[in-house]
Image (cartoon, rainbow, N blue to C red):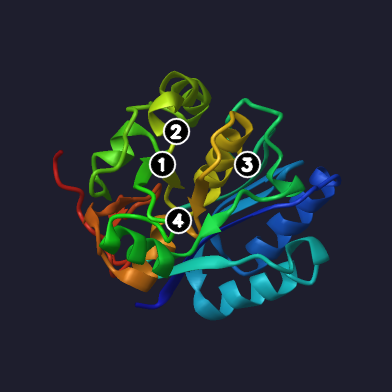
Amino acid sequence: MKILNIAAYRFVALDDLPVLQVAVLQQLEDRAIMGTVLLAEEGINLFLAAPAPDIHDFLAWLRQDARFAGLQTKDSWTETPPFHKLLVKIKPEIIRMNHPAVQPAAGRAPAVDALTLKRWLDNGHDDKGQAVVMLDTRNDFEVDVGTFEGAIDWRIRKFTEFPQALLDHQDALRGKTVVSFCTGGIRCEKAAIFMREAGLQDVFQLDGGILHYFEVNADAHFKGSCFVFDDRRAVDAALAADTPKPP
């Protein structure tokens, strides 16, 4: 496996988007890195692939900017790049929710780490003895490829539908510990903030999403594989390419 694939995001205030776009594009082109980078006033979201030295060199350059010093990646390996082009785009949001009151850069919702979540799921409750429910914040076709056992799935077709779905179902979540999850952490972070804004108290995001959970716990309490938006289509608990099975 000679190609390093990374997924990463960071919510941080950015105010020089056109300048940053040009600089990031140049650095990626110089290293022949393929994939997508999204820039918005709320932060950065990236999915990239190249030989490991090129990826590490780019990340070292990016992290010289104090705004990205804390950027963490989810890593996997393939024989060939799963991307065929490079895009660096400026967007209104790095993950579209259409709810401007949610500003993750102003403060994160509480997160539960992968080891703690597995322990909760093993026990059937959190450390306070409260029932734990897993809430899948991804699109319906992603959920069909794989999800946590017993996870709540509102069959949303796009993330902009999540706020209304939450408002329609929030009463069923009261009195429970809700853990929102997604592929790499970005959607479940926004979702957790929105849920707390809506008045739910015991809400956590799965830190690092499914991809980091796989790194730590393999497929414990998870059925199927994780959909990804590249040529692999899905990855299994070993973060290797996996052919999605029909639902």
* Residue 141, x across and y down, in percent: 29, 35
Residue 120: assigned label? none
Please state which of residues 140 and 152 is positioned toward the viewer in this rendering.
Answer: 152
Q: Quarter of the image containing the N terminus?
A: bottom left
Residue at point 81%, 48% (across, down) = 14
Q: Which residue matches tag 4? A: 209
Question: Considering only order in the chain, which callout, 3 or 1, is on the residue closer to the N terminus?
Answer: 3
Q: Check disc 2: other Cα within 10 Å, few if <14, some if 14-19, many if 20+.
A: some
Between the C-alphas of marks 1 and 3, the distance is 30 Å
Q: Quarter of the image containing the C terminus?
A: top left
**Which of the 4 image quadrants contains residue 76?**
bottom left
Between the C-alphas of marks 4 and 2, the distance is 23 Å
Mark 2 touching mark 1, by CB under 8 A? yes
* Residue 59, x across and y down, in percent: 65, 71
Residue at point 49%, 21% (across, down) = 167
Q: Check disc 1: other Cα within 10 Å, few if <14, some if 14-19, many if 20+.
A: some
Q: Which residue matches tag 1? A: 176
Please state which of residues 13 and 15 is positioned toward the viewer in this rendering.
Answer: 13
Q: Check disc 4: other Cα within 10 Å, few if <14, some if 14-19, many if 20+.
A: many
Between the C-alphas of marks 1 and 4, the distance is 20 Å
**Which of the 4 image quadrants contains residue 41?**
top right
Question: Considering only order in the chain, which callout, 2 or 4, is on the residue closer to the N terminus?
Answer: 2
Instruction: Label 1, secondary structure: give it.
Output: loop
Residue 94: assigned label? 3
Q: Which residue matches tag 2? A: 174
Amino acid at circle 4: Gly
Amino acid at circle 1: Lys
